[in-house]
């Protein structure tokens, strides 16, 4: 499985990004967004999605 790792400046920024991802996932159930696979202090591993990205 391919993984995309996003690196953040600090844990607070990572936390806000994770919360934003969860909000989008619940607010727009018809849109496919990459699943979060793993979370570390300043990194999130996302599922890699094929195709055109927004």
Image: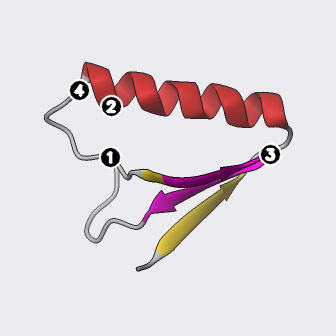
Is mark 4 in CB contact (under 8 Å) with mark 2? yes
Q: Secondary structure of the magenta portion, mostly?
A: strand
Residue picked out by circle 3 = 41
Q: Residue furthest bottom?
A: 1
Identify the mark nearer the N-term, 1 or 3.
1
Judge from the rendering whether residue 12 lies leftward or rightward of residue 38; answer left or right: right
* Above or below: residue 23 compared with residue 47: above
Q: What secondary structure is marked by label 4?
A: loop
Nearer mark to the viewer, of 1 and 3: 3
Residue 49, how many percent across, how many down? 33, 65
Is mark 1 in CB contact (under 8 Å) with mark 3? no
Mark 2 surroundings within 10 Å by alpha-carbon count, few (fewer than 14), some (14 through 19), many (20 or more): some
Residue picked out by circle 1 = 33
Q: Residue furthest right?
A: 10
Residue 31, how many percent across, how many down? 20, 39
Residue 48, how many percent across, how many down? 40, 67
Is mark 1 in CB contact (under 8 Å) with mark 4? yes
Residue picked out by circle 2 = 25
Q: Residue at x 23, y 26 (%)?
A: 28
Q: What secondary structure is marked by label 1?
A: loop
Identify the mark nearer the N-term, 2 or 1.
2
Residue 45 part of the magenta segment: yes
Q: What secondary structure is marked by label 2?
A: helix
Q: Specify the quadrant that holds the N terminus.
A: bottom left
Residue picked out by circle 4 = 28
**What segment is highlighted magenta in the picture?**
37-47
């Amino acid at each position: 499985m391919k993984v995309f790792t996003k690196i953040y400046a600090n844990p607070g920024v990572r936390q806000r990004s994770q919360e934003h991802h969860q909000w989008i996932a619940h607010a727009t159930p018809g849109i496919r967004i990459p699943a979060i696979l793993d979370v570390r202090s300043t990194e999130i591993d996302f599922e890699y999605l094929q195709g055109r990205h927004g």
